[in-house]
Amino acid sequence: MSAEHDKSACLIRRALPSDAALLPEIEHSAASTFTADPSLHFILDMPVMSAEQHLEFMQKGHVLVAECDSMLGGFLVAETMPDEGCLHVWELSVHQDFQRRGFGRKLLDAAADLAKAQGCASLSLTTFGDIPWNRPFYESCGYQVLPVSQYNARFRSIAELEQSIGLPIERRVAMIRTIYSVQNRSVSRHIERKCRNSNGE
């Protein structure tokens, strides 16, 4: 991919089946960013989502891509948690050639629109809490760290999964972005409490 692209040409759209084969390479390129932290070089050797996995999420309508000049520069994979009124972002990756162009932020905003359309009151994700381009970036997009004491069964399960694949769990954080409107505040707070319930009830 060439680094010469018009930032204004970014188009966010739902992924097509024909995009699936291109997404693993984008995730692998995005992972190379972690080489800036010597303790995280091992991430480059970790498996990325397969084309088949992307196709499964596409069937649910939860894969968004950032397209620039007919080339894919990034993607976002999410899953609706209907019992919690929450849309969980499993993966956000932007190819190195397209970074620092606002693609990640646009993908997250599109995910928020998707969550609203599905009646979700919030979005969630997990990331590294001590890396400058992770937690601070998500905070600038409206996400807040969820204390471990407030993890529900889903977040505990995610933490166990991340630990099992070799991620340093002590450096990982769960984050939530609330998207309710003022008039729906009371209803949205109720849904968000369900998402934060440490008993998973």
Image (tube, helix red, strand yellow):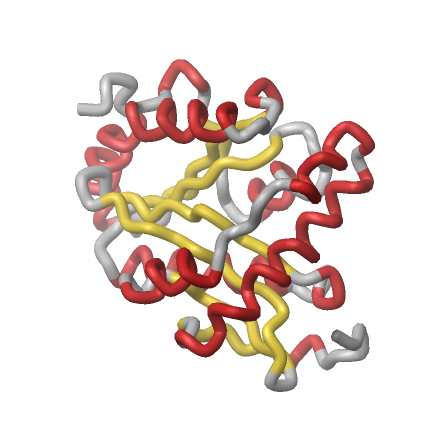
Q: Nearer the viewer, residue 78 or 113?
A: 78
The picture places residue 107, in percent across and down from the top left corner, at: 51, 62
Can you say which quadrant of the picture contains the N terminus?
Answer: bottom right
Q: Nearer the viewer, residue 160 or 80?
A: 160
Residue at 80% x, 73% y is 3
- Judge from the rendering whether residue 61 lies leftward or rightward of residue 98; answer left or right: left
Q: Answer above or below: position of 70 versus 95.
A: below
Examine the image and state in which quarter residue 38 appears: top right
Q: Answer above or below: position of 98 versus 144.
A: below
The picture places residue 13, in percent across and down from the top left corner, at: 45, 75
- Judge from the rendering whether residue 73 lies leftward or rightward of residue 193; answer left or right: right
The picture places residue 165, in percent across and down from the top left corner, at: 53, 30
Examine the image and state in which quarter residue 119 appears: bottom left
Q: How many labels does the image show?
A: 0
Residue at 55% x, 64% y is 23
Residue at 23% x, 38% y is 84
Q: Which residue lies furthest to the top in this view?
A: 149
The picture places residue 27, in percent across and down from the top left corner, at: 61, 56
Can you say which quadrant of the picture contains the C terminus?
Answer: top left
Residue at 28% x, 50% y is 80
Q: Which of 3 and 129 is in front in this view?
A: 3
